Amino acid sequence: RTALEEAAGPGSWGQMQSSGPHGSRGTSRGWGADITLPLLYPVGCHWARRLEQEVDGVMRIFGGVQQLREIYKDNRNLFEVQENEPQKLVEKVAGDIESLLDRKVQALKRLADAAENFQKAHRWQDNIKEEDIVYYDAKADAELDDPESEDVERGSKASTLRLDFIEDPNFKNKVNYSYTAVQIPTDIYKGSTVILNELNWTEALENVFMENRRQDPTLLWQVFGSATGVTRYYPGRYQPLHLLGRYIQGASSPKDMVIIVDVSGSVSGLTLKLMKTSVCEMLDTLSDDDYVNVASFNEKAQPVSCFTHLVQANVRNKKVFKEAVQGMVAKGTTGYKAGFEYAFDQLQNSNITRANCNKMIMMFTDGGEDRVQDVFEKYNWPNRTVRVFTFSVGQHNYDVTPLQWMACANKGYYFEIPSIGAIRINTQEYLDVLGRPMVLAGKEAKQVQWTNVYEDALEGMGLAPFPQGWLVVTGTLPVFNLTQDGPGEKKNQLILGVMGIDVALNDIKRLTPNYTLGANGYVFAIDLNGYVLLHPNLKPQTTNFREPVTLDFLDAELEDENKEEIRRSMIDGNKGHKQIRTLVKSLDERYIDEVTRNYTWVPIRSTNYSLGLVLPPYSTFYLQANLSDQILQVKYFEFLLPSSFESEGHVFIAPREYCKDLNASDNNTEFLKNFIELMEKVTPDSKQCNNFLLHNLILDTGITQQLVERVWRDQDLNTYSLLAVFAATDGGITRVFPNKAAEDWTENPEPFNASFYRRSLDNHGYVFKPPHQDALLRPLELENDTVGILVSTAVELSLGRRTLRPAVVGVKLDLEAWAEKFKVLASNRTHQDQPQQCGPNSHCEMDCEVNNEDLLCVLIDDGGFLVLSNQNHQWDQVGRFFSEVDANLMLALYNNSFYTRKESYDYQAACAPQPPGNLGAAPRGVFVPTVADFLNLAWWTSAAAWSLFQQLLYGLIYHSWFQADPAEAEGSPETRESSCVMKQTQYYFGSVNASYNAIIDCGNCSRLFHAQRLTNTNLLFVVAEKPLCSQCEAGRLLQKETHSDGPEQCELVQRPRYRRGPHICFDYNATEDTSDCGRGASFPPSLGVLVSLQLLLLLGLPPRPQPQVLVHASRRL
């Protein structure tokens, strides 16, 4: 046998098989008789042991793990060991959150009661005028700056206040606490009698808003969203709030809705476009408590999307519907029977998850004669459990009586949508009908609902990405109309609107334990949908005020069966505790660690939330400094002064809220300066400071200085090619020695937010962290020896029976020097020997130093990133995913189970805006006729022509109809990043823990390699033949984050995640009066009316504006 055959183990070289479960087999190329490959298994193991010993020796000498343990024990009198008791902790926090939310609930109830009383006492005024009402219009200042503003032209600003605003720390913006602000949608005429009466009686709410703030100065926005479309909020603020859907959620009970759309051939181009826009607006009125499906019909009915049954109306499902609706095509004949039978069958399907409360069918059509009474008799009569709402869309001359009859006969309502300006009003009007049972139920229905998480209505305050502190939940409470038309008359069944109060998540987060849970412990909370209210991974990167921030608990973490079980128990309102083995993603999202975590959870009473606590076992205990000796305080504090850095190493302090008056800064040098200046004025025991944080910070300053004194100062780092040594602590100190090394220190100064710190706590042994490199960026620049590799390890401290990890220590290796050292350690010589050159006339074993032209030797970390290589040309690729360096070898390592892959989705990512399409000058959703249409005489006599003409005339009078609402216009996709889904892929060590040889089967280009895990590290040592050709380059593993559509929604809805809806439902009341079911309210396509309007415009006598929808405008929510 040749040495090459011996390296392959028993059997012939060609028969050697990989020991991995996915291994391939093949034949390696032959080497010359005079140059032989080493006996890979024994020699590779020998090299691995030398590498392990070198790393361990350096860390023992310079890391100072043992010495730091002794320092802690020597200073045992300066701290106490406290215990985190999960059950007590989580119950206390849940109680505190309950108390916080209860204060907001009491404020809501005061507002709702006051609003009902004010409206009941108000006397309706038929002759009220605009100049009789004085208020602050949220858009007034902006309109005054615009000389072409419609309101300026009408001269209505005489009744509008001009306010002064002051900066407020709660809102981080300018507000006015003396007045409320009013917001009226652009498609509602603010001079109508209904709106003016609404402004009149709601003015009295100002005093209640102010009294609420006096009782609770932490209150954020207090808002009354009226059914008329008027929004009054406090405090007053320049520019409107973004409220939208969050208040709709409080106006009705959950809904099961089927939307059916007539796509018969009679639907003209404009009408179909109006229908598509109307359906999208209708979908926006639904929340995650609702279920929906959308179908189109002509002779037959079919779903517009891949959803074959009712699905949850969450953001992603609604997106699927909206995209599918745009693909509807008109053809065939109208078949109401097919559409309604499909809808009733959907609502009767009891084998799926659904809301099980309000049931309704929304039909959009251009008109028809069939009343389909037989369908209603079969499916809905006599109980009429399903409400039917009909929408006559577009301009036409059809008899609308059948559509009115359908709605009136099924406890619904009939609406007309003649043009784009009527869409939003009429697609939200149905909520008034659904609100009737709530109003009639009285106090029983006065239930506070907490919405999903939304981005604050402060328009992001110019901050991007959106910080978690400006996420809010809104408590909503319906406000009922208590008036009666006369003695003995029926009770009024109209909902006045919804009262709301925002609660910042930051205010809730302040009630959770602060820094006592360690770097990897945290508190989280979820709602009945499983969406997180609190979670360290809740970090939306874009601003979108229309949609809620819905991140499922199983998407915030890496999903597994144990977490599914925990989530279900929390949704069911149970208490529980469970220790699990699970996967966690590193902070920089490059690594996966398998860890042990303890989950403890309890419900938050009087709410639909549940609170959870996650603790690693090593965070059961924590240190609490007890620095009562003021002389010692001063002594340790002096080591924070920059004047000490040259001798004691540079100190970074975590940017925490140590004191109320401490000025924050993203620059750590400036923050330290601010901290020192404040400490010269106050003591660590000051009431304005967090004594726990300050004492622990000062204690750790002294302890890490003692590490410098005992270990680092007397060592020559250059001897072992070290750029720096460092220590980071739970107390917030990161000390880097020597001082000059701080210039190239790029780690986060907050240890709890530093990836090396958190990973070191979760892993035993030494954790290597190469510099982060993106494949698209230029290679590392190895100049001035500044590129280093971090090696860190946790300091485990045992005090009696209590074990904790209060610090992490490590070294920073000089990349270039250690690359040379790596070649020596993986060679057949000692430090003193000279390398033995193998050549044609000599017989010797090859190694990684001498034969680097034939052998590739690398160290790869547990994430698959290159750490060291014997190839000089690969040094600038250190930190890259190894597949980008040697795709062939990385794929073999994966196939042989050295690595396991984990794929997940980031639903909070931000993507660059898509380039705008070919947008015309017409309003969105409006049909734009072609040149051929204009030349066609028949087109001018069509309903589409009259509808377009009417919209243009309306637009001349109400030009705001052609403008986007400010809530929609700001942050247009052309200028702002949009939310998107990114697919993330990480690799981590698989099940193989042994070392063995394997063959990469590439036909004539097969390669032999040896791989072995290095003990007590996160490294894999690999020795391989260098490839002679690139025939095996086809398989390339990808690690980089990529844009994705996410999991297939059509498949996900077949296995929906567990959820629960609200526990109470108001969908029926025996006393409900259903006689008000819509009689039509829009202007007909009358030639006389249109010509009269045109003449008035030509004569320069603009008519007094009237609401487009004369009746329904007063009921807009």
Image: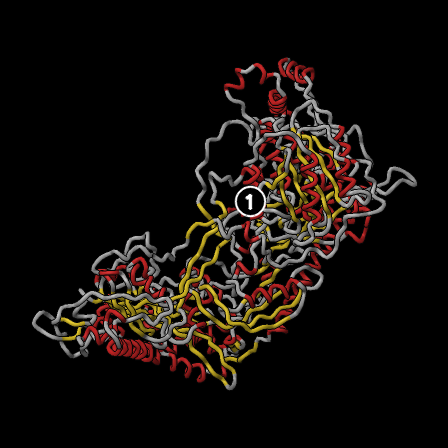
Instruction: Tell me where residue 845 appears, x and y as whole percent.
Output: 17, 75
Look at the numbered disc 1 and give the secondary structure of its residue. helix
Occupied quadrant, residue 1087: top right
- Tell me the kind of residue under disc 1: Val
Q: Quadrant of the N terminus?
A: bottom left
Instruction: Tell me where residue 300 appears, x and y as whole percent.
Output: 63, 36
The residue beneath circle 1 is 320
Query: Residue at the location (24% across, 56% down)?
Result: 1030
Query: Residue at the location (40% across, 80% down)?
Result: 68
Q: 384 or 1039: which is nearer to us?
A: 384
Instruction: Tell me where residue 458 appears, x and y as whole percent.
Output: 58, 46
Left or right? Give the position of 935 relative to 115.
Answer: left
Residue at the far bottom in the pictured view: 800
Q: Is residue 484 above or below residue 824?
A: above
Report if residue 794 is visible in the image: yes
Q: 689 or 318: which is nearer to us?
A: 318
- Give the colour scheme of this rendering: secondary structure
Q: Is residue 371 above or below residue 436?
A: above
